[in-house]
């Protein structure tokens, strides 16, 4: 009997996390999903769970703060199957300038960097330490162009994404002896709930439509399909990278 394989998706209830949960389910993975939703948005998570089950796979979802140490320990303690895929797709941060009267404060900046950057490191190392990620594991983390470019009011998230990419590189070299890979995923501009929270996001959309040779925005499903392909065992030599999944958007000046 073939051992069940699990994908653990952080940020599973919307955007890239939702699309990836469904795509991995169709590829034969059971899904552990971590999300943080209140009453108004909780139906989103329930809908994703149902889509996973409709694909014939098991769905175990946790409505907790993924950046909380105690909650992370609870989730990892509840995991029973081997986790071959870890996807970090958390979009929980403050969008403010770094100077002036409306500047981000220390607490907000540190919370943003912790949730969207450092939490990747904590989840990955705890999974490995618990023996839950076997040889051949794949770690993916959603980054953005803000990790290397300045965008108005995006400074705190830019710092988090830069940290995220640094953690990916470090995980790649330290986990290589275990045959576990780590890569950051840089998607093109995608119409997600997280994008719509960015002040002036309409300009980002307009610029992306002008640049993308396909004449459209990236869709979460575009990224999810590529993640399934990158999870193939034959991609074992791809690690420590920032991989663009943007339809060529990033190649156009």
Image (tube, grey):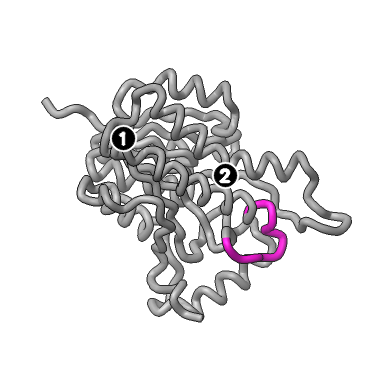
Label 1: few (<14), some or many (≥20) within 10 Å? some
**142 relative to 93 in the view: left or right:** left
**Residue 148 in the image: above or below residue 123:** below
- Residue 210: x and y in percent read 50, 80
Residue 220, how many percent across, how many down?
42, 56
- Is residue 87 in sight in this rendering? yes
> Mark on residue 220?
none
Is 238 rendered above or below residue 145?
Answer: above
Q: Nearer the viewer, residue 53 or 82?
A: 82
Q: Residues within 10 Å of mark 2 (few under 14, many from 20)?
A: many
Tell me which segment is drawn in magenta.
148-157
Q: Nearer the viewer, residue 105 or 28?
A: 105
For label 2, the SS is helix
Query: Where is 160 relative to 10, above or below?
Result: below
Q: Residue at x 38, y 77 (%)?
A: 214
Magenta-colored stretch includes residue 154: yes
**Secondary structure beneath label 1:** helix
Q: Residue at x 46, y 59 (%)?
A: 186
- Per the image, is 211 magenta? no
Question: Residue 6: percent from the left, percent from the top?
Answer: 30, 33
The disc label shown at residue 178, or none: 1
Q: Residue at x 26, y 40 (%)?
A: 55
Residue at mark 2:
117
Relative to 236, does residue 77 appear above or below in the rendering?
above
Q: Which residue is at the front of the view, 182 or 65?
A: 182
Image spot of residue 199 (x, y percent)? 69, 62
Residue in view at x 50 percent, y 21 percent: 73
Q: What is the quadrant of the N terminus in the image?
A: top left
Q: Main secondary structure of the magenta part?
A: loop
Which sits in the foreground, 224 or 97?
A: 97
């Amino acid at each position: 009997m073939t051992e069940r394989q699990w994908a653990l998706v952080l940020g599973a209830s919307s955007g890239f996390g939702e699309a990836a949960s469904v795509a991995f389910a169709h590829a034969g993975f059971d899904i552990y999903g971590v999300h943080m939703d209140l009453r108004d948005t909780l139906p989103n998570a329930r809908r994703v769970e149902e889509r996973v089950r409709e694909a014939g796979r098991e769905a175990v979802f946790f409505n907790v703060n993924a950046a909380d140490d105690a909650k992370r320990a609870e989730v990892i303690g509840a995991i029973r199957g081997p986790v071959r895929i870890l996807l970090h797709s958390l979009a929980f941060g403050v969008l403010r300038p770094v100077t002036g009267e409306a500047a981000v404060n220390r607490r907000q900046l540190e919370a943003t960097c912790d949730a969207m950057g450092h939490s990747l490191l904590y989840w990955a190392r705890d999974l490995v330490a618990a023996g839950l990620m076997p040889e051949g594991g794949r770690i993916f983390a959603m980054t953005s162009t803000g990790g290397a470019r300045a965008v108005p009011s995006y400074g705190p998230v830019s710092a988090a994404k830069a940290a995220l990419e640094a953690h990916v590189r470090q995980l790649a070299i330290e986990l290589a002896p275990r045959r576990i890979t780590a890569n950051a995923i840089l998607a093109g501009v995608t119409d997600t709930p997280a994008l719509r929270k960015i002040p002036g996001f309409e300009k980002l959309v307009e610029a992306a439509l002008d640049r993308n040779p396909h004449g459209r925005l990236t869709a979460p499903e575009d990224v999810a399909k590529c993640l399934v392909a990158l999870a193939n065992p034959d991609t074992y030599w791809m690690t420590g990278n920032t991989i663009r999944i943007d339809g060529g958007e990033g190649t156009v000046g």
